[in-house]
Amino acid sequence: MTIHVVSPGETVDSIAAGYGVAPKQLAADNELPSDYALAVGQTLVVRFPRAVHVVAAGETLTSIADQYGTTVRQLWRNNWALGGQEALSVGQLLVISYFGEKLGQGVFNGYAYPFISPELLAEQLNADMLIILTAVEKVAVNFRKENERWLDAMTPDQALQYAREGQFAPGSMLPKVEAAVKFAESKTGRQALITLLEKARDGIAGKTGTIVQMQEAGVPEREAVGALS
């Protein structure tokens, strides 16, 4: 997946041809009008077909990673539904990459799309912070259990470990954490904040919310791009 900024003279057909995707799919992904009208400077999301692997008998994540020149860690990131587990089933489909993208860039499952799109935009705008607004003030582990714990901050590695433990619900908190991790890893110093809409200002000021970042640090008031669940 990538972001394309429309230049003078470009059309849906010419852009689609440049990326090797179908014009109809490009139009549908961006909810374009029936005449495919574009404006100069308009941003388009371009989704590439997935490169997938069908698990065969005897294969492991390690052997598959070696086959494609990637890592087990990256396969986990591309297939968060695995929950960081090693176990595979014969016939299981694994996302390896998207055609047109380098292996190891981090690819996410379809249910994360509403959050990955703002994440990609935030990268393109060179924002320092991505804000993902949700229904809780902070990310929690052991959610709604007696030992529930709300997180002030976590690194991408910690987030992956929590995902392995099944701490984040698919289709709920998991895709939000995925987008936060991708943004935090995209450039040194970038942070992603997950919090309530009503607490966004306090979160930017470092008073609440869960910060995802490569290294522990304070949260200065910076230009931010938000995603609303």
Image: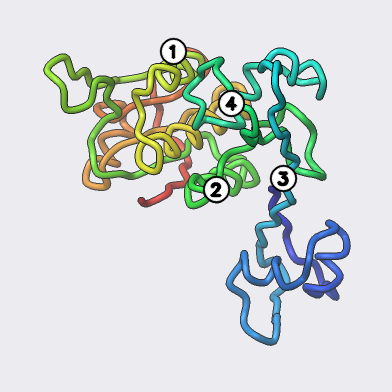
Spatial CA distance of label 3 from label 2 is 11 Å
According to the picture, the residue beneath numbered tag 1 turns out to be 216
Residue 175 image offset from top left, x and y in percent? 45, 39
The answer to which of marks 1 and 2 sits earlier in the sequence is 2
Q: Which mark is residue 89?
A: 4
Type of the residue with mark 3: Arg
Helix, strand, or loop for circle 4?
A: loop
Residue 158 image offset from top left, x and y in percent? 44, 14
Q: Nearer the viewer, residue 211 or 168?
A: 168
Kindly identify the residue that appears in the image at 75 percent across and 66 percent down. Answer: 6
Image quadrant of residue 51? top right
Helix, strand, or loop for circle 3?
A: strand
Asked whether the beta carbons under mark 1 and mark 2 sit within 8 Å of each other, the answer is no
Query: Is label 1 or label 3 in front?
Result: 3
Residue 191 image offset from top left, x and y in percent? 48, 28
Helix, strand, or loop for circle 2?
A: helix
Spatial CA distance of label 2 from label 4 is 21 Å
According to the picture, the residue beneath numbered tag 2 turns out to be 110
The answer to which of marks 1 and 4 sits earlier in the sequence is 4
Q: Which mark is residue 15?
A: none
For residue 137, above or below residue 111: above
The answer to which of marks 1 and 3 sits earlier in the sequence is 3
Type of the residue with mark 2: Gly
The answer to which of marks 3 and 4 sits earlier in the sequence is 3
Helix, strand, or loop for circle 1?
A: loop
According to the picture, the residue beneath numbered tag 3 turns out to be 50
The answer to which of marks 3 and 2 sits earlier in the sequence is 3
Q: Nearer the viewer, residue 59 or 104?
A: 59
Query: Is label 1 or label 2 in front?
Result: 2
